[in-house]
Image: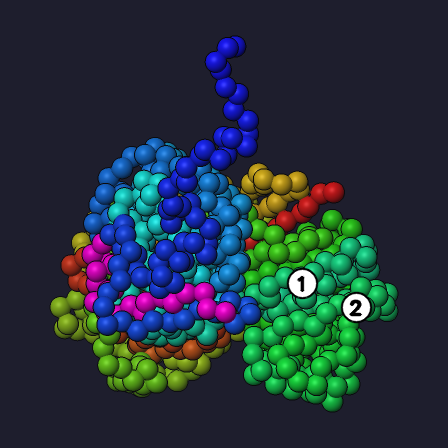
Amino acid sequence: MAGSTINTVQNIFQSMDYGPAATPSTATAQAWLDNHSRSLGLFFDGKFVCPADRQSCSLADSKGGHVCSTVCAVEADVSQAASSAVSGHKAWSSLSCYQRAKVLLRLVGVLGQHGQCVSELCELCEASCSPSALVRLLQYYSSWAQLRDMLIPHWTPLGVVAVVVSEDCSLYSLMLKVLPALAMGNSVVAVPGRSSAPPALLLAQLFVGAGLPAGALNVLTGSDMSLGAKVAQNPSISYVTYSGSKQDGVTLCKTTAGMGVPVSVSCNIGARCPFIIFESADIDSAVDAVIEAAFKKKREVHWVLCVQESVQDSVVARLRLRMAGMKCVALHSEGDRVLVDTAIQVAQQQGATLVQSCAAPPSGAQYPPTVLCGAAPSSPFVVSPSPGPLLPLLTFRSNTEAVSLGNHSPHGQAASIWTEDLTLALDMAKSLSVGSVWVNSHSVSDPCLPVSGHKDSGTCTDGGHEGLYQFLRPSSSSSPLPRSSPVSMDYSKFGTAASPAIFPDDSDLASAPKPYLQFVGGKSCKSVSGCSVAVQSPGGGSVLAYCPDGGRKDVRNAVEAAVKVQPGWMKKSPSARAQSLYSLTKGLEAKRRDIAASVSVQTGLSMDEADTEVELSIARLSDWAAYCDKIQGGTPPLPESGSALSFPEALGVVGLVLPDKNPLLSMVTLLGAAIANGNAVVMVPSQKYPLPALAFVQVLQASDLPAGLVSVITGSRDELTAALANHSVIKAIWYWGSAEGCQFLQYTCTSPLKILHLSCQKEDDGKDWTKSHPSLLEEMWRNAIQWKSVWIPTA
């Protein structure tokens, strides 16, 4: 047309003005750091805060270049963050489930828009976490935020949750706890490690920009794990959950003992995990996978290669071929090189041969990938692996020996099994005491699958529907631990100042009621010490009976009997366990009158009231019998090809220190929960009211429960609690007692880690055992199990 002008692409670009400077949320990682002058403050009340007069920690990249510095928070900052979290919880929990889910879903779009910035920052800080993994977490937990009230009724959020991770923990491990806590309606105070702090601060800023209420997510940074203890000490914190190394987790547990805040631990750094290759495996695929897992990925765990003897030569030959030409792996420091050289020297002295990709340099913080062939399970470089790229190789003959090698570790995080025999793979998966089993694969994860740390790898469950319950509590109960300050205690002397015991002679016993016996290994017996304690009437007047004064040796005998019988009881079908519980119910019904009399004479209740408690106890045992085969695992859908299984497993041997309130009903509630799920039990009856539990021994003797599955030991609560805590085989302790006893257990049950369910009982409050609330049974059931996930990929 006449008078018209045609704009070429060149003209358009030349006439364009510069757009606005990139905002922190849309810039690259370097621009975002420059916008903060490479000095990142704390994040609470929905914004960055840079307090004056604070020390800072410098973070360097893999080449030694300066990335940024972070503020070291002090107690005043912790108080501000906790106050912000309380306000944030009010705003966040007041939203409907749909509104919370909408905010989390909006974050998916925000991460998609700013994924490059997040990815670059994670790479700079060596805090491995891909944006796609974060998006998957947000998608999964946003749906649970939507469905919380529908699928998890009768449970409420805890309040303010502290999420603490160690220095070497990944950003993914941090968000695996932060996001479900937010999805369930809690507010969060996150304490990341030094490397994961910058990405965590960036995500907090993005989350608030996407609509998360100010204060719902707060980030405190520091120089060491002492900050986590300072956060736990704040009275506004309802729960502390930790991920990282075992050493830092133990430090946190001991430092927070007696503060009245529950602490759970996931030790996902530094664990020893077996990589088991059977003769029926695809050897080429298995060798490729072991090289990738041991030498090419960031080593958060230490792999131990276990190979069947018949294919050892084939595996070693392929390892030599695949490793040829591989470059040296960078170590963190010169100190790590010293540890590696020491491990190599010890291995060669013990007869191990080396398979290396190239010659080791004479010095420097580098070392070639190395396989140590001919290692023994007890070798120091197997028991305590060095931080370098060293892979011990062990051999086995039979499947049973493979299980023994796989379980020959205090850790129980994961295992990788390589075989084309699916029956063998599933049998191995059930036999290995680990939380995750990967069949013909390794190091894969998804939030839909629950993973529990077995043995020393943790005390809580992360992921899946089951992992949400650590951030919830039954709506029918209050917090079992009152907030308090730790008392000064000599932990080595706890339980030694027991009540004086007596050695009653025959003349004393002739005038007293028939003396009771405790129940150990399926037999009624006296205590090892031969001592007894007098049980007085409710008013403190006449002596009702003499009970054995059990001690450490009685606990030892009970645990030895339990260990022998528990594996067989666990392998019984749920329906078979249900029938045994029904027989226990019938036995209690048959002894109803005698046991009601023991409840009445011990507690001072009328016979009608005592009979009502017996009736409730019969009904409660029937509930547990019905529970046995009703709630099991499943096959959750995966976002990738393959199948997966999740199923609950028994903890092992559980110690029960029973409450004073409703001595019979509370006992059968806890006992039923434990044995219905395949556990063995060592019970310590109420020190104040032991007679109902001792009368219940007659029911146990007449039942078809395996001898040794349940033991009943009377005596000093503190002395027997100390014996349970110091026994390495006991996996969990459920305790009702004093604040000092709770503090002792939190401090002591760290090596090995024990799952604790603590309640500081008082005369005027506590759990209402008479109400059969749905959440009561579910809470007890979940306390009695640990979860295992099995991955089965397809081509």
In the rendered image, which quarter is residue 220 located in? bottom left
Query: Does the magenta run of residues contain 153?
Result: no
User: Within 10 angstroms of label 1, few (less than 14), some, or many (20 or more) residues?
Assistant: some
**Residue denoted by label 1:** 296
Amino acid on which the number 2 mark rests in the picture: Gly
Q: In the image, what residue occupies the spot 59% across and 41% down?
A: 638
Q: In the image, what residue occupies the spot 23% across and 72% down?
A: 53
Amino acid on which the number 1 mark rests in the picture: Lys
**Image x and y of residue 445, in percent:** 57, 51
**Residue denoted by label 2:** 325
Residue 106 appears in the figure: yes
Q: In the image, what residue occupies the spot 48% across and 41% down?
A: 112
Q: In the image, what residue occupies the spot 27% across and 44% down?
A: 213
N-term mark: 1 or 2: 1
Q: Is residue 337 left or right of residue 456?
A: right
Give how far apart the Cα atoms at labels 1 and 2 are: 14 Å
Instruction: Please give the range of residues in magenta.
Output: 65-85
**Image x and y of residue 594, in percent:** 31, 57
Tell me, for residue 397, which label it has, or none: none
Q: Is residue 449 above or below residue 199?
A: above
Query: Does the magenta run of residues contain 84?
Result: yes
Residue most toward the top? Answer: 1
